[in-house]
Image: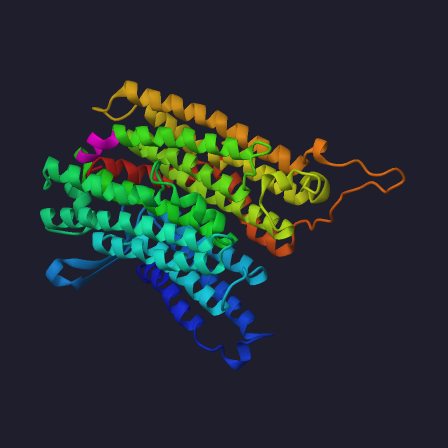
Amino acid sequence: MQFLLAFVVAAPLLGALAALLPAPPGLKGKSPEQAVLRHGVTVTGVILAAAVALALGFDHDTPARFQATTDISWIPALDVRIHLGIDGISLPLLLMTALLFFLCALYSYFKLPEGPSPKAFVALLLVLESGTLATFAVLDLLLFFLAFEMVLIPMYFLIARWGGAQRQAAAWKFILYTLLGSVVMLLGLLLIGVNSGTFDMVALASDNGRELTHTTQLLAVLAIGTGLAVKTPMWPLHSWLPDAHTAAPTVGSVLLAGVLLKMGTYGFVRILLPVTPDGMATFAPYLGAFAAVGIVYGSLACLWLARKGNTGDLKRLIAYSSVGHMGFVLLGIASMTPTGVNGALFANIAHGLITGLLFFLVGALKDRYGTADLDTLAGATGAALYGRAPRLGAFLAFAAVASLGLPGLAGFWGEMLALFGAFEPAQGLSRPAFLTYMAFGAFGTLLTAAYLLTVVRRVCMGDPAARPRPAPGAASGPALELADIQRYEFAAWTPLVALTVLAGLWPAVLLGLTDPAVQKLLAGGNA
């Protein structure tokens, strides 16, 4: 177990180095490009297999205890240690990350985005995987920061070199926002480490802020929370996200929504809640307010983009939907209750699965039409997927109803538990304020249903009023031939569908892992 976790974190880096080397003669296949893409699928597949083995070996009777731990002194002068471990909070995120990277590598093998050398693409993808997996596995504040920052450069180049229109501007906006947030976050992490005498996250969580004054906790929450909020992203620090998603290649959008956004909310749960509880209690009402506004704002933006005549980009719409969905995650965290935090963690996983699927589907539509513009997709030569590509239409409709929180699918449980957490927040928090936030969140669910059903109606059914009637004597039928789902697309998307259904019908699988760990975390490591 100890070796498996270290392997999962380090192997992608070794794979990235190997991707840059010439392929051995017997493994070149039809071309060097095919060899390096096959290498990416192989490495991410091995990492996924190791993560599954890690989950099978995990002691599910004690999910609150850190397992598969490695603790080696690295910088003795600063008491910085290579400390790795997983519990019921980090294990699901680790598994989802490994799965999404494998599916993205598999998809790219058949549909590589246009850009420079495939070698660089695969190497950047594997460096990105190592950074994200390390973020969920490290138990030292400075290592957390290094892993947190490790993902920025690979994602910048994936957007800037393999993205679409306006990719350079979107990539610069992404890197500037996240780097500025990270500088502030580093100051907060150093403030905690210097004042408590350790950077070890397990020791800090057990201490539960007793070594930190109230002022220190406030400053730490403000600094670290700002950096985490940019990555989440929380309204009003979200403006980099729609541009990045719109410009990124398909797999870049999948990983950005499915994995990178979770790093911010994970930091709130893993660091701020247990290490600075008093500071979090002071800022929780403000965090809840920003979350509630983000839910409504993101939904209204999507509703505007979905309307006819607004030339809304479907990728941009799904990006704004992430602002709203991550608002539910932040609202659950702000409640500081086991119910709310469990809901936030569940919503994290659900959003990764469902929004990852949505970006895969939108990317497939854009590949077929050359555009993701909603008016074009619903116009005279539009998609009308139910008639032209019924399986693609069925997948899109499924992802949409899962995203709006249909009971029985994964999106329902996280949002419901987050709202329950706001209904009865932690002791000391203003219940009237959180009831107001809950009302905003409930209104946001109605808006979410409105814009997603509008998208399904327009894209899957088309716009009959916009389609010209066939000339007298002309053959009727679709105006445009459209390829339905290909085999590689089916292979990449079906696991996300299956897990969305499984998590929706059997939520105890995930909640059984997270709840004991959350109970212990909120109790300061004593439960």
Q: Which image quadrant is residue 352 in? A: top left
Q: Nearer the viewer, residue 333 or 364?
A: 364
Q: Which image quadrant is residue 238 in? A: top left
Query: Is residue 505 visible from the viewing direction of this image?
Result: no
Where residue 376 appears, as percent x and y from the top left, is 63, 41
- Is 98 positioned to the left or the right of 385 in the image? left
Query: Is residue 69 visible from the viewing direction of this image?
Result: yes
- Is 209 positioned to the left or the right of 238 in the image? left
Residue drawn at 17 percent across, 52 percent down: 199
Where residue 210 appears, as percent x and y from the top left, is 11, 39
In magenta, the rendered stretch is 279-284
Residue drawn at 14 percent across, 47 percent down: 191
Where residue 381 appears, as percent x and y from the top left, is 70, 43
Return the residue found at the far bottom: 25
Return the residue found at the far right: 473
Q: How is the image coloured?
A: rainbow
Q: How many labels, in total? A: 0
* Placement of the N terminus among the 4 image quadrants: bottom left
Q: Is residue 271 above or below residue 331?
A: below
Where residue 334 appears, as percent x and y from the top left, is 29, 32
Residue drawn at 27 percent across, 49 percent down: 180
Residue 515 in magenta stretch: no
Q: Give the main secondary structure, helix, strand or loop, of the magenta stretch.
A: helix
